[in-house]
Amino acid sequence: MISEPSRYYAVELQALPARIGQIRRIASAHLRHWRLDDLVDPVGLGLTELLSNVHRHAQPDKECAVELELLLDRLTVSVRDNDPRIPVAADPTARDPYDEPDALATSGRGLAIVGALSDSWGARPCGASGKTVWFTLTAPPCAGGPAVTGAEAGFGLVPAGPVVSYSRLAGVPLGAPAEAPALAASGAPV
């Protein structure tokens, strides 16, 4: 019996610049919900690099799917697209030693960055057309919480819990703007 929780989230999108930031924020929110705060920055950077590669290189379209999967102590982040070409990280040692390195280059380092920030990474063919590029990170031992059902995990929903409701301040009629109560020196409402 596996006593550790497993988590899963997937979303399909077009890898357009405006969507990349949105997906990064959505992934960060899921990681925080899963208590994986330490992984927010490396996942955000790696996901940005993979989605940017789809935007720049994928043919015939920019359709892709992002998946986050936490199994035991391993978080796997993957991006699947419709381009069957398997990417290869640039080998910095393959440079001609007489060429000046281009320190101001603004591209060409994406997979090297993913490799540097992750425990492992790779690419695999996906069916007749397409591929999946993935990377893994070790999750901290305190991550998780109660496991969620497949339906909840697949759609990014949280398990049922207490409902918190908010109401207007006492004595403020509906339709009137609510003002914050004055605070006494102790910080308690007056």
Image: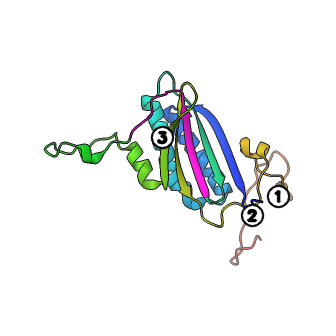
Amino acid at circle 1? Leu
Q: Crowding near pointer 2: few (<14 within 10 Å), some, many (20+)?
A: few
Q: Residue at x 81, y 45 (%)?
A: 175
Quadrant containing the C terminus in the rendered view: bottom right
Region in magenta? 74-88
Amino acid at circle 2? Pro
Return the disc, 2 or 1, that comes first in the chain's sequence.
1
Report the number of discs.
Answer: 3
- Residue where numbered disc 2 is placed: 181
Left or right placement of residue 26 versus residue 1 in this view: left
Image quadrant assignment for residue 86:
top left
Q: Which mark is residue 169?
A: 1
Q: Which mark is residue 53?
A: none
Per the image, is 86 magenta? yes
Amino acid at circle 3? Leu
Return the disc, 3 or 2, that comes first in the chain's sequence.
3
Callout 3: SS: helix
- Residue where numbered disc 3 is placed: 50
Measured as percent of width and height from the top left, residue 91 is found at: 31, 44
Verify CB contact (< 8 Å) between mark 3 and mark 1. Answer: no
- In this view, 135 is above or below 61: below
Callout 1: SS: loop
- In this view, 17 is above or below 141: above
Verify CB contact (< 8 Å) between mark 2 and mark 1. Answer: yes
Q: Residue at x 83, y 52 (%)?
A: 160
Left or right placement of residue 102 versus residue 27 in this view: left
Per the image, is 113 magenta? no
How far, Cα to Cα, is label 3 from label 1? 48 Å
